[in-house]
Amino acid sequence: MTVKQISVFLENKPGKLAAFTKLLSDNGIDIRAINIAEASDFGIIRMIVKDIYNATTLLKDANYICSVTDVLAVEVKDEPGALSSLIAVLGDKDVNVEYMYALTNRIKGVAYMIIRPNDQAKAIAALEGSGMKIVSTEQLF
Amino acid sequence: MERYYQPEIECASREEIRKIQSERLVKQVQNVWDNVPMYRKRMEEAGLTPADIQSVDDLHKLPFIEKDDLRDQYPYGLLARPLSDCVRVQSTSGTTGRRVVAFYTQHDLDLWEDCCARAIVAAGGTKDDVCHVSYGYGLFTGGPGLNGGSHRVGCLTLPMSSGNTDRQIQFMTDLGSTIICCTPSYAAYLAESIHERGVRDQIKLKAGIFGAEAWTEEMRHDIEEKLGIKAYDIYGLTEISGPGVSFECSEQTGMHVNEDHFIPEIINPKTGEVLPDGEKGELVFTSITKEAFPLMRYRTRDICVLSREKCSCGRTHVKMSKPLGRSDDMLIVKGVNVFPSQIETVLLNQGYPANYQIIVDRVNNSDTIEVQVEMTPEMFSDNLSEVTAKEKELVAGLKAMLGIYAKVTLVNPKTITRSEGKAVRIIDKRNLYKG
Ligand SMILES: [Zn+2]
């Protein structure tokens, strides 16, 4: 079970991020999680939204470069050590994490990690094998 | 010992070459007069008939033609043979406006391949060689030209085409490629990649034939040293035939023009006056053996020098210098000549669109150059390190090509300013010549 993430190319210039977020809010895109990775002259925005199709259509029409990637959303307890045990589970099975980011939950005491592993199938096997809970897009909203 | 593909013509006496050129020129003039309305009209406007062209001494009387004429006559206007006699089309990359399409009869292809075979033999090629062709195949003339030449020489030919560096290097090591044909910027990149992979001792290359873009002596030395080869320059234009219009010999001091097929002239680009050997000016070609698509006094816009000094290789054909620039769009940055076409070549080789902008500025009394490139869905990834790695590769490619560092900025699609539909390629903020 995977979650679809939208990645967007964004120039690193004043006003670009503001214009981007305004476009999404003006069009009522419900963003569940957002993460920005920055290089010197550009950034990559990664986000989990409710309606992938609407969001990508909107972005493409506005001349943004974007792509949709399958990532894993894993439930972790909102307590010390939960994240390191998640990483250990993956590391034990030789799965590398390209990047990851957190989103808080509406249910208290539980958080979700969005993970982009180098090997999706191996990651799923490792997580399921250790009893970790992988959730669907619907469960995030 | 020097070897030749067609020694009887490559080493013919100057008198003999002149005689062949005059005969062929007279025939070609009659041919275009009879078959190409544009040439007839231009000659009539200049008050000429075919009878006015009796030898190469009369060549200067003919009007010039330019790239715009080729675009205006697109696609069939300059054909001198029925389309049914043509067997091949090649085309220029055509980044702005209409592209140029050139037609070939089988005979045209045969002569073109002969020219490329001369270049391969001049670079030491024999039937025992493994010739690795990493020019692009397709409409671009690089791949098809060298491929045909390699067959004629009898080399084992690897039609690699461009890109996929891992596969290139694997074939090179597994099949023992001895001659590599590609653009100089790709050669520099390959050399770098071979070193990174630590497989230099498994490479059997002895020579490279590099063309289709401008390169420097520094690049040559760098490539020669890194790959342990001798690097030969080759020149050509799709309009005239493709690579092999001229090629370098072992002396490496200029490229012998295949004068039995192409007559070169150097002119003053402002006045059109023909300049003597040794003077710098615009290179003009007349293709005297082309059947399908003959060009008469075609202005290449390349700035060159011709030399008829005796060459140690034994070839008697005139030598042309590397193009020293374009007659129209040269920039001087940090004292180095920079041509937008060089930047464009690197972009295209690395899979970027040819839509770019060059911004030249002066910061603290030092020139800076920035190349803005539009991001494409193909180049994009959700993974930051993948995108920055591609960006670094582009910076390295530009450095190898230009000899100076250029900052690369990736921008959103459709953000590069266009005026009247044509992109503004160069923004020079230095205002050095103001007032
Ligand atoms: Zn020579």
Image (cartoon, coloured by chain):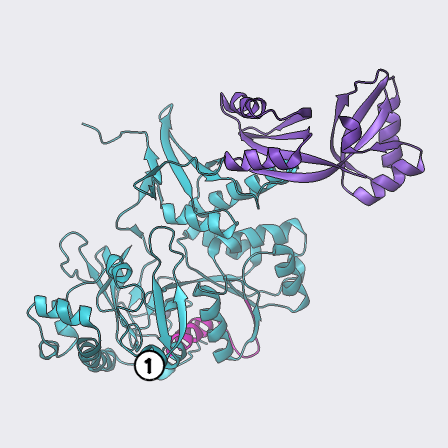
Chain colours: A purple, B cyan
Secondary structure, mark 1, is helix
Span of residues in magenta: B111-132
Depth order, front residue of A94/B97 = B97
Q: Is residue B261 visible?
A: yes
Q: Please indicate whether residue B297 sits to the left or right of residue B429 in the image.
A: left
Whole-percent x, y for residue B21 in the image: 23, 78
Relative to B359, residue A109 above or below: above
Q: Is residue A92 visible?
A: no
Relative to B57, residue B201 above or below: above
Whole-percent x, y for residue B119 in the image: 42, 71
Depth order, front residue of B177/B1 = B177
Quadrant position of ligand 1: bottom left
Whole-percent x, y for residue B251 in the image: 39, 65
Whole-percent x, y for residue B266 in the image: 21, 61
The answer to which image quadrant residue A56 occupies is: top right
Relative to B56, residue B383 above or below: above
Q: As shown in the figure, which amino acid type bears the numbered disc 1?
A: Ile
| The residue at label 1 has a CB less than 8 Å from ligand 1 | no
Looking at the image, which residue is at 65% across and 49% down? B196
10 Å crowding of disc 1: few (<14), some (14-19), many (20+): some
The answer to which image quadrant residue B318 occupies is: bottom left
Residue B113 within the segment the image draws in magenta:
yes
Q: Please indicate whether residue A22 sits to the left or right of residue B35 in the image.
A: right
Residue B319 within the segment the image draws in magenta:
no
Looking at the image, which residue is at 47% across and 75% down? B148
- Which residue occupies the extreme bottom position in the image? B8
Looking at the image, which residue is at 57% across and 26% down? A27
Looking at the image, which residue is at 44% across and 64% down? B139
Depth order, front residue of B77/B123 = B77
Relative to B333, residue B155 above or below: below
Image quarter hosting the C terminus of chain B: top left
According to the picture, the residue beneath numbered tag 1 turns out to be: B9
